[in-house]
Image (spheres, rainbow, N blue to C red):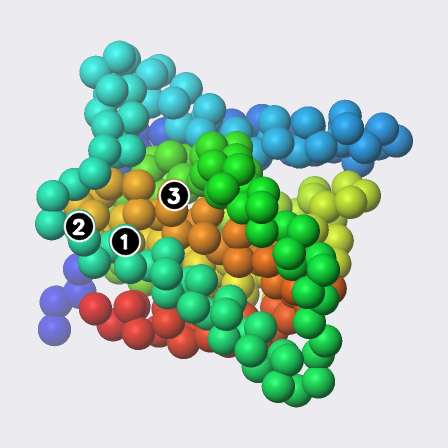
């Protein structure tokens, strides 16, 4: 039997390494500053600023290595791709998982905070836009637009998406040190498993879209909106059952 080894071009390794260093540095510096501040408004601004690390790093490395044409190609991944309709199903699948999680919690004794939920609903359109632009969706140009294709050139798709998920989870780590973040209420180990499951789902959506990241942006937005609604409706996020549902969905798409 002949064994084939996977060869990764040295340039790709260098570009990927530069991207990862840039993404972490550009995010962790403002997040580290936020962890030391007492002013809530300043902390919030720095948390949002750090969220742009993956995007800025992707654009910077692409500009350095390929110039303006390469940057235009990278930004072109935001465009809708013909034949990518199924990829857009990932957002409603994630919202369905959040709804089933809420239903299961209520059936097992949780109390619905109707007042808090109704207070959030009028702001939902603004929340969706903000999350898509600065609260999660903005990361996708880096994770799914830049990093994932490079890992898929060397690894099977599921392994590449899993690797991105693990990196993505570690990238979030400083948020546990910042007062007031949603991460502080979540166990990091469970969050990491959730990140892997979501990474597989978003990676699949990007592949189905022919490399376009718009379905991943919408799915990432759906995830964060769903988490916010669960927090409002139940007072906390039942992350374990939600993660179980997302893992089940990830196992289904990983076989496709």
Q: Is residue 31 left or right of residue 60?
A: right
Task: Name the residue at 39% across, 52% down.
Answer: 219
In the rendered structure, which disc, 2 or 3, sits on the residue that comes first in sequence? 2
Label at residue 84: 2
Q: Residues within 10 Å of mark 3 (few under 14, many from 20)?
A: many
Provide the secondary structure element on which disc 1 rests.
helix
In the rendered structure, which disc, 3 or 1, sits on the residue that comes first in sequence? 1
Image quarter for residue 114?
bottom right
Provide the secondary structure element on which disc 2 rests.
loop
Residue beneath label 3, please? 217
Q: Is residue 68 left or right of residue 195?
A: left
Query: Distance from label 3 to label 1 (Cα)?
Result: 10 Å
Task: Mark 1 and mark 2 in contact? Answer it, CB < 8 Å.
Answer: yes
Q: Is residue 252 left or right of residue 166?
A: left
Q: Nearer the viewer, residue 214 or 173?
A: 214
Label at residue 88: 1
Task: Name the residue at 27% across, 53% down.
Answer: 88
Task: Name the residue at 37% across, 61% down.
Answer: 92
């Amino acid at each position: 039997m002949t064994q084939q080894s996977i060869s990764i071009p040295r340039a790709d390794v260098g570009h990927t390494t530069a991207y990862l260093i840039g993404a972490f540095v550009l995010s962790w510096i403002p997040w580290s500053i936020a962890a030391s501040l007492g002013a809530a408004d300043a902390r919030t601004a720095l948390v949002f600023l750090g969220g742009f690390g993956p995007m800025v790093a992707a654009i910077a490395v692409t500009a350095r290595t390929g110039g303006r044409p390469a940057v235009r190609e990278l930004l072109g991944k935001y465009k809708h791709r013909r034949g990518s309709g199924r990829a857009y199903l990932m957002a409603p699948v994630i919202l369905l998982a959040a709804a089933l999680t809420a239903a299961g919690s209520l059936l097992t004794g949780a109390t619905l905070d109707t007042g808090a939920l109704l207070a959030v609903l009028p702001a939902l359109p603004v929340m969706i836009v903000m999350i898509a632009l600065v609260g999660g969706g903005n990361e996708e140009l880096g994770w799914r637009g830049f990093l994932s294709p490079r890992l898929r050139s060397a690894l099977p798709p599921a392994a590449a998406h899993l690797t991105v998920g693990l990196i993505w989870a570690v990238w979030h780590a400083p948020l546990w040190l910042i007062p007031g973040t949603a991460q502080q209420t979540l166990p990091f180990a469970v969050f990491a498993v959730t990140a892997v499951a979501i990474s597989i789902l978003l990676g699949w959506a990007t592949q189905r879209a022919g490399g376009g990241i718009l379905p991943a942006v919408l799915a990432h937005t759906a995830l964060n909106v769903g988490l916010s609604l669960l927090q409002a409706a139940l007072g906390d996020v039942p992350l374990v059952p939600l993660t179980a549902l997302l893992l089940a969905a990830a196992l289904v798409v990983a076989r496709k």
